[in-house]
Image (cartoon, grey):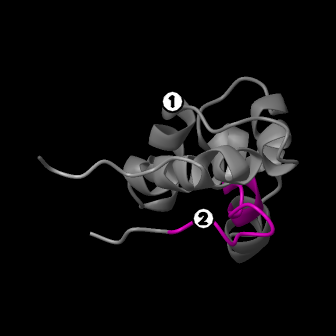
Amino acid sequence: MTVRDYADFVQPLAHPGEHLREDFLPEYDLTPGKLARAMGLKERSRMERLVREEQALTPDTALRLARVFGTSAEFWMNLQTQHDLSKAAMAARDELAAIVPLKVA
């Protein structure tokens, strides 16, 4: 298992929307609207907000992205989790540094 130390991060890890916008949409020649249709969504706004990094990825969206791109829902959820953890660690950097780890008795 990899343990990531967020103490020295100067910016959060990439949002899943950035991965979609930079890696997946161009590769498949998709717009957020075309992707939404391929995912069976009635409205494109969810995907538009996601690629603009204005909305977090939901489990439902992760399942749909996994199906449409042949990946796993865990891949997409892990991207969101790592992004969220890195943001939280940066925001609480001083408080986290002050915590003394416990030792086994």
Which one is earlier in the sequence, the residue at label 2 or at label 1? Answer: 2
Which one is in front, 28 or 77?
Answer: 77
Q: Which residue is mark 2?
A: 6
- Which residue occupies 66% across, 44% down? 95
Q: Nearer the viewer, mark 2 or mark 1?
A: 2
Q: Residue 60 at x, y = what percent?
A: 51, 30
**Quick check: 45 left or right of 92?**
right
The 10 Å Cα crowd at callout 2, few under 14, some 14 to 19, many 20 or more, is some
- Above or below — where is 27 with respect to 59? below
Kind of residue at disc 1: Asp
* Residue 29 on image: x %, y %: 77, 69
Report which quarter residue 8 is drawn in.
bottom right
Residue 16 falls left or right of residue 68? right
Residue behind mark 1:
60
Task: Please report the residue visible at 41 percent of the width from the left and 47 percent of the height from the top.
Answer: 73
In the image shown, does 54 or 37 lie closer to the viewer?
A: 54
Quarter of the figure with residue 25: bottom right
Which residue is outermost to the front?
105
Q: Quadrant of the N terminus?
A: bottom left
| Residue 12 is a magenta residue | yes
| Residue kind at label 2, given as amino acid type | Tyr
**Mark 2: which secondary structure?**
loop
SS for callout 1: helix
Q: Which mark is residue 74?
A: none
Q: Which residues are magenta?
A: 5-19
Does the magenta segment cover residue 40? no
Image point (71%, 23%), residue name: 42
Asked whether the viewer can see residue 87, the reply is no
Badge 1: how crowded within 10 Å, few (<14), some, or many (20+)? few
